[in-house]
Image (tube, grey):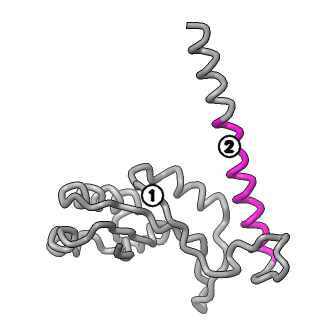
């Protein structure tokens, strides 16, 4: 597995095919912070998917759960932005969430690492997961009811 930056994909078009012939998994990061003048994150992901498909490689998503302060220190990314990426990019086989200690802080942990925003992100993400689970349960019940009726 190789974690690469998602920026500047067009400049690597001559390199990616040879690289991917020797790589099982490409796991790029940074789609949410593409620089001005570059492709959009979605455009870069679509190109990388085609390259991986052509080479028989897997494309995974290294989702960043943090943002950078001007001094390059990290702070938790708002849950709305994380959910946006989770729903925008539908071509990734797997999604890995790269985070540093203290970006997601369980409020029940015996030692708190990070600030209050880290606890908020943990709670918001847990609420998002619970909503997904509830929605799937409703959808499954409707599917079962439909099958029984027909």
Residue 33 is labelled as none
Q: Which residue is drawn at 64% across and 70% down?
A: 77
Q: Is mark 2 on a helix, strand or loop?
A: helix
Q: How many marks?
A: 2
Q: Mark 1 points at which residue?
A: 94
Choose top left, top right, bottom left or bottom right for residue 54.
bottom left
Q: Left or right of 47: which side holds 18?
A: left
Asked whether residue 128 is drawn in magenta, I would say: yes
Classify mark 1: residues with Cα within 10 Å, few (<14), some (14-19) or many (20+).
Answer: few
Q: Name the residue under label 2.
A: 133
Choose top left, top right, bottom left or bottom right for residue 146.
top right
Report the quarter where the N terminus lies. bottom left
Q: Left or right of 112: which side holds 21?
A: left
Asked whether residue 23 is drawn in magenta, I would say: no
Q: Is mark 1 on a helix, strand or loop?
A: strand
Mark 2–mark 1 CB contact (< 8 Å)? no
Q: Where is residue 97 in the image (x, y as percent from the top left)?
A: 55, 68
Q: Residue at x 67, y 37 (%)?
A: 135
Q: Residue at x 58, y 81 (%)?
A: 68
Q: Which residue is drawn at 62% across and 88% down?
A: 73
Q: Where is residue 63 in the image (x, y as percent from the top left)?
A: 51, 67
Q: Earlier in the sequence, mark 2 or mark 1?
A: 1
Report the quarter where the C terminus lies. top right
Q: Position of residue 48 (x, y in %)?
A: 29, 62
User: In the rendered structure, which segment of residues is drawn in magenta?
Assistant: 116-136
Residue 71 lies, with reference to residue 141, above or below; the image says below
């Amino acid at each position: 597995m190789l974690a690469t930056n998602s920026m500047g994909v067009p400049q690597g078009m001559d390199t990616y095919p040879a690289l991917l012939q020797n790589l099982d998994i490409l796991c790029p990061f940074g789609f949410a912070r593409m620089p001005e003048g570059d492709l959009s994150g979605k455009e870069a992901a679509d190109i990388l998917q085609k390259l991986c498909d052509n080479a028989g490689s897997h494309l995974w998503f290294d989702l960043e759960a943090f943002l950078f302060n001007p001094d390059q220190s990290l702070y938790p990314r708002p849950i709305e932005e994380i959910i946006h990426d989770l729903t925008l990019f539908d071509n990734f086989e797997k999604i890995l969430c790269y985070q540093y200690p203290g970006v997601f802080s369980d409020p029940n942990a015996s030692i708190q690492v990070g600030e209050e925003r880290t606890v908020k992100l943990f709670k918001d993400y847990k609420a998002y997961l619970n909503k997904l689970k509830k929605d799937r349960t409703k959808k499954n019940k409707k599917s079962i009811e439909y099958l029984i009726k027909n």
